[in-house]
Amino acid sequence: MLGAESRLEVRLKKLEALMRNPQSALNLETLLDSISALAHDLNYPALRKNKNIESFLNRYEKAASQLRELQVKLEDFDRVKLIGRGAYGEVQLVRHKASQKVYAMKQLSKFEMIKRSDSAFFWEERHIMAFSNSPWVVQLCCAFQDDRHLYMVMEFMPGGDLVTLTMNYDIPEKWARFYTAEVVLALNAIHSMGFIHRDVKPDNMLLDQHGHLKLADFGTCMKMDSTGMVHCDTAVGTPDYISPEVLQSQGGDGYYGRECDWWSVGVFIYELLVGETPFYAESLVGTYGKIMNHQNSLVFPDDVEMSQDAKDLICAFLTDRKVRLGRTGVDDIKRHPFFKNSHWTFDNIRETVAPVVPELSSDIDTSNFDDIENDKGDAETFPPPRAFVGNQLPFIGFTYFKEDQLLKGNNSCSVEESEDGKESSEEKEDCSDSRKELQKKLHQLEEQLDHEMQAKDELEHKCKNATNRLDKLVKELDKEMNSRQRVEASLRQLERERALLQHQSAENLRKVEIEADRKRGLENELNNLRDQLEDLRKRNQNSQISNEKNIQLQKQLEEANTMLQAEQEGVGRLKKSQSEVQKQAQSLEVSLREMQEKCSQLENSKMELEKQLRGLQAELEEEKRDRNLGTETITDLQGRISGLEEEVKEVKSSLSKVKTDKKALQQKLTDLEKEKSNQEIDLTFKLKSLQQSLEQEEAEHKATKAKLADKDTIYESIEEAKSAALKEMEATLQEEHSLKLQVEGKLLQLEKDHSMLDCDYKQALQKLDQLQAQKEKLSEEVKHLTLRLDDEIHKRSLSQSDLKMQNQQVSVLRSSEKQLKQELNHLLDLKQVLEKQNKELRREKQEADGQWKELKDQLEAEQYFTTLYKTQIRELKDERDERNKLYKELQQRLVEYQEERDSLTSQLEASLTKADSEQLARSIAEEQYSDLEKEKIMKELEIKDMMARHKQELGDKEATISSLEESNRTLTVDVGNLASEKEELNNQLKEMQQQLQKAKEEEKKMNSLKLSFEKQLQNERTLKIQAVNKLAEVMNRRETVRGGHRSIDTEVHRKEKENRKLQLELRAEKEKLNSTIIKYQKELTEMQALIAEENQVRLELQMALDSKDSDLEQLRCQLTSLSVHSLESTSISSGNDLDMGEGYPDSRLEGWISLPTKNTKRFGWDKKYVVVSSKKILFYNSELDREQANPFMTLDIE
């Protein structure tokens, strides 16, 4: 028994360990998740019909809702701002209401994750953030869920990502070294957990409030096998940072290890130092081609200063995986000469000051994050299932808490029972042993005192040395402060000089332009003077005056030539500067051409987008039309349902009348049966009396026969009298028998009438049930159609949101188009295309107009047809009115009977409603009683459990009290013996403690001095490092306006990168759009087919309904005629009966009619069988179809 108990205890301990372990599949949160997930997945009306599911929900539904209320939920947090959005959800900055702490909360849509195949990524992300205790990984504080979303509450990183840092600063090699070292340590932490990241890039590197780096976004992580490798057949990661071995895994059996992450680190270092990725290309194919040919495509630009160590490290990372740095371990990377510096090591890098410390105004400062608009669109949710789906099951075990207090608590210490009857000798031995132990402790304390005194002396010596160092450091600090002031002054001077140089360059350009204008003016004057000279030479060759003028003109020419020479020298200088400017202009033109090419590409993509937009708009219009048709059909159905309800009410009222008639007949039957029974009793009584008289006479006859055997004459006379009496009795019996037969015949006739009425009543009830069933079917169909309409509206809203996104992209493209309109002449081609399209549209319009005209002609023919029928209906109505006048006299007689009948029906209805209400109250009371009984039983069971537990606890406590009392007795004896020895030892200890306290006080003073000096030292160091870093930050901060070729190139590269990202996003969006379009088209076709089928079914049902309506009307007429026959059987003559029998069916006409078929001249007239009721006209192909099939067409008279 003891062995079995111990084995059970071991098993229970193992089970408890599994429940306590947060990494096990049977931890407490997983078990709680499974209950709430099952309760939610089963809580649907369609599933509740199952008896087992209903019993499970009755037991656990309340517990599951209570569990959800008690666990962490979304209402425990206040939302501050949206700081990120992805494919599956978004990241919000939140504040915890209870603790007022700030967190980043990632919200993931369950519907989106189940819809896509790669939805299991969140498990790796949760596992890494929850169970990595590394300071280089973003920590998960808690994870919880509701029926629509998963939530991961993480620590908030207010410094933003490294992308924003690279956008705001030029990264020097010193900074790149620091951030690369931190990335290496972060990746080593993830690799040590057995995972490969596979998407290392600046977007996934976040900065905390101190500027230190942490890795995030572990959705692409994959668990390594025992050999440190991974099997994967898809290329995962960002194109610019992906390694060759990961690229080769696409479509094949990829097999690679952690070295793929070190490749991404090499790309990251290159990007930090150069400003762009090493394998950048305009297309994705070009990028992948460069990555696969990395031996030849890796090039370092000449205009970027980079040390040889940095180049070696990049080359060591961006090489074949077999010889890549880091393949054997992280120590090879740490030993690389690139990381050698005097400021930090890999062990203390987290304690040093970061190159850029974020300047934060509050704990919710989001200045380092992009502004993102809130998504106002409603997210998709799971539709209500008709069978068990289990949408919540994939997320069981997701809930997690960093500090789980549910199973924490000290295990009850088992108190060992002391044995009775210990010997005094053993006690004495224990006392002697304790004395020896105390003496040993005393010796140890003395030795410690000596050591402490020595340590005190050493500390004093160290303190002196520290003060000396402090003085030196203070002096060094002063020198550095002075040097800092000088640097700041030199910085200011440099900024002034830069501004002056900019101003001078602008003035030089202006002077060049002025000089060019002057040169042009002088050249014009020269030409004019030459023309004048030639004219003067021709005119005044012989005159002296012309000579004098020539001389004067020659002088002017010489002066002009001298001026020209001076100007030409200036022009030569200007030409040199102009050539330099032209070179710059040429480089700008090259960049402009590249931009123009990109613009043309963008325009082509814009054209494609516009085409897609038109297609989407056309689809939207079709959806709108379908929606309008759906709404129209729903309104028609609702109208018809209301009509059916009214008809059902009328049938119910007629049925109630029939019931009253039936009751009256039943009363008559009972009266007749009573009369019959009375007559039978009378007849039986008479028969008995006759039999008695016969018996008496026979007895007398026997007596007389015995007395008078000899007298034949007397005997004959007696026999004659006897035969006469018998004849009289037989005659009376025959009369009675004939009367009985007449009564029985009357009874049989009444029973036949009663059975006929019962049959009619049952048929009417069956028809009523059928009509109600049809009504319920129609209402279900209407509900189904409304649900589909809602789905369609929801899908339409989604497509509209997609359209809005596309429209936004189109608007961006249009803005770029406006800027480049002057240089591009593609609009003419577009115009021609549009004109062609316009012509095609006009042709289509003409075709549509023709179709419309044909439809109009058909409509006119149908209208003519309806007018014909209306005239026929009017004539029929007139005939009906004339006949109605004849029935008014009969109706006046019936009014009195109807009033009596109405009063009886009202009484009956009141009694029925009372009975129904009593039945309802009784059923509700019974349900409440059953629920209360269930609760009572549950509570009784709980009380029994509680009582049993209480008794067990009482027994355990009593046992522990008894054991403690026994141990107390033995201990009091021991305490008495030890008290005297304790007093002696206490005296000795007090002396030692006093000496120790003095030493400790001195030591504390020394320690406090030491700590204060160390704090001062640390503060001074941090201030110094911060000052240097701030200077470097100011130096490396990128300004908005900067001259020089490199700034233009970097801006162009950045723009190209952004353009490329946009193109990639555009492609992804196009693919998504195409897939959604295909999906919607499929759904549309399915919906259209369903609608067509439903329309056919609806039409068939409508036809059946119409025929049933006419049958109902006929039945009503028969019922009214029967009621009239029964009520007026005494007062109305047979002639009147015949008139009534002829009158009522006239409201329902039947017969053949000729209908026109399209063109009467060619096709003639078709004969159809027609039934005209008070509300509708029903058309059948033949008289047989009227009884066997539904009508092929109906017309409403109203």
Image: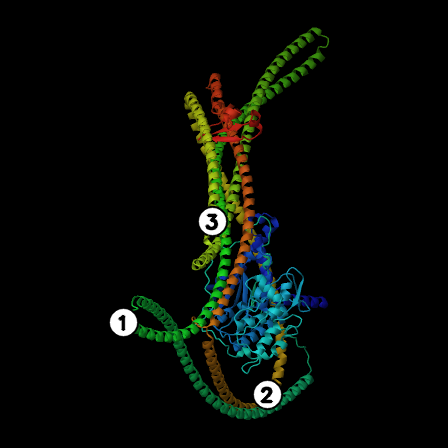
Q: From this viewpoint, which residue is outermost toward the left?
A: 545
- What kind of residue is marked 1? Gln
Against 513, residue 638 (above or below) is above
**Earlier sequence position, callout 3 versus callout 2:** 3
- What kind of residue is marked 2? Lys
- Reading the image, the residue beneath label 3 is 832
Q: Badge 2, how many Cα within 10 Å: few under 14, some, many 20+?
A: some
- Reading the image, the residue beneath label 2 is 982
- What kind of residue is marked 3? Gln
- Measured as percent of width and height from the top left, residue 199 is found at 58, 66
What separation in Å lies between label 1 and label 2 (alpha carbons)? 150 Å
Observer-nearest of 937 and 1174: 1174
> Disc number at residue 1067?
none
Q: How many marks?
A: 3
Q: With 92 as the anchor, is 58 left or right in this view? A: right
- Measured as percent of width and height from the top left, residue 551 is found at 30, 74
- Measured as percent of width and height from the top left, residue 512 is found at 38, 72
Task: For mark 2, give the secondary structure.
Answer: helix
Task: For mark 1, give the secondary structure.
Answer: helix
Q: Badge 1, how many Cα within 10 Å: few under 14, some, many 20+?
A: few
> Disc number at residue 544?
1
Q: From this viewpoint, which residue is outermost toward the top?
A: 713
Residue 238 shows up from this direction: no
Task: For mark 3, give the secondary structure.
Answer: helix
What separation in Å lies between label 3 and label 1 (alpha carbons)? 74 Å
